Amino acid sequence: MRNDQKPRIFLSIMFLTTLIVCAVLLGACNRKPNQDVVYENDKYGFSLKLPGDFAQKVDIREEGNCIYFVDKEVQAKHPEQVFGIIGRIETYDKKEFTRKNLIELEDMYGLRYLGESGSHYISWAHATDVQVPADASEKTIQDFRALEKEFDTVIGSFTTKKDDDRQAASAAGHQNPQNVDEYSLMADNRSITLKSWYKEADLSTLLGKPVSETNEVLGSTSDTYSGSHIKTLKYEGLVIKLFSPKDNGKEFWLMSVDLTSSKLQTPMGITVGSTLAQLKEAYIDIEIVLDGRTDANNCAYRVSMREEYKYITFEVEKGIVKEIKLFAELP
């Protein structure tokens, strides 16, 4: 080989190497990460948002009144049964169950109330028995636990479509555009829903850091709720109270929201500053609170679901909504 050919061969090799490296990098840049998936259950009227990686690792199986979220890796090793359950959603027909029935189940095995569709109550829970085989590797166990934690986040995206509410609203010429639970307030198109479970970090994402926070443990005068925990978070124009069962104190559900500013609104578009006419137009079944006041422009109005112990009260002064309060009574 002539000496003047060596540099040319070397340059050719370098050029080809550069092309290969660029192709690999370009392919990596163009490769799209797993996209989020929206899981919609038309049978029970709810939806969840699943992160792409989570959706790739989990199977969703419906059996009876339960929807199981199953670790694919664990399930593949035990195909003869549903195994590797990281969490489940349970549905209860309103014709057969009351909200009180669910509260009893919540105390029995940690069932947590999510909301309701037109015909069903909907709750969720983690598995109460071992869902990882005894011979599983440490990596399999860690991956399973990570999916369990991610399932908690997925549950936070839960929304319902209440058929009865939509039909009534449609008859009045109005619809709830977000199709979320009526007993909610909206923050940046995301709902804060009565009786849903929240972590303080979740609320901080929606509302920012609270101005103050207090914690209270209910005493003996609270009867069966003695030892339960109430956390109060105060923001500008907003007070939120969260409830946690006794012997817990770490997980809380939304007990009440007291709104005196226009920073939030109901799913029907009512906020502090709305007119009485707008309020009555949005809620055709609204009732005056019987507290002795008789002036329609200066009294309280209420929407309620008494069997669920859920209420929304609108305080009206001079025909303008001045305060909105959502609250759940303890039965």
Image: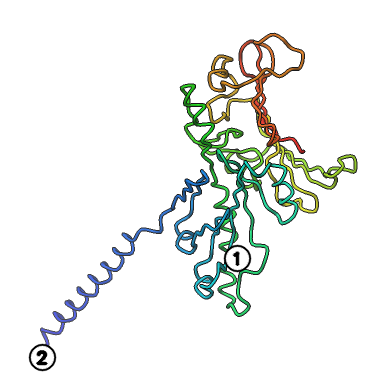
Residue 204 lies left or right of residue 245; in this view the side is left
Residue 122 in sight from this viewpoint: yes
Please name the amino acid that badge 2 sits on.
Met
Residue 202 in sight from this viewpoint: no
Does residue 309 lie above or below 126 as drawn? above
Q: Which residue is mark 1?
A: 145
Extreme front residue here?
95
Residue at 65%, 48% (x, y): give it.
199
Extreme right residue here?
220
Using the rendered view, name the quadrant where residue 240 is placed. Answer: top right
Residue at 57%, 22% (x, y): give it.
283
**Residue 1 marker:** 2
In depth, the one of 283 and 213 nearer the eye is 283
Q: Is the C terminus in the top left, top right, bottom left or bottom right quadrant?
A: top right
Residue at 71%, 46% (x, y): give it.
101
Assign a secondary structure to mark 1.
Answer: helix
Quick check: marks 1 and 2 in contact, CB under 8 Å?
A: no
The spot of residue 67 in percent (x, y) is: 55, 55
Extreme bottom residue here?
1
In depth, the one of 31 and 212 nearer the eye is 31
The spot of residue 297 in percent (x, y) is: 65, 10
Tell me if mark 2 has few (under 14), some (14-19) or many (20+) residues whose alpha carbon lies within 10 angstroms of its own.
Answer: few
Camera-near label (1 vs 2) is: 1
Extreme top residue here?
295
Please name the amino acid that badge 1 sits on.
Arg
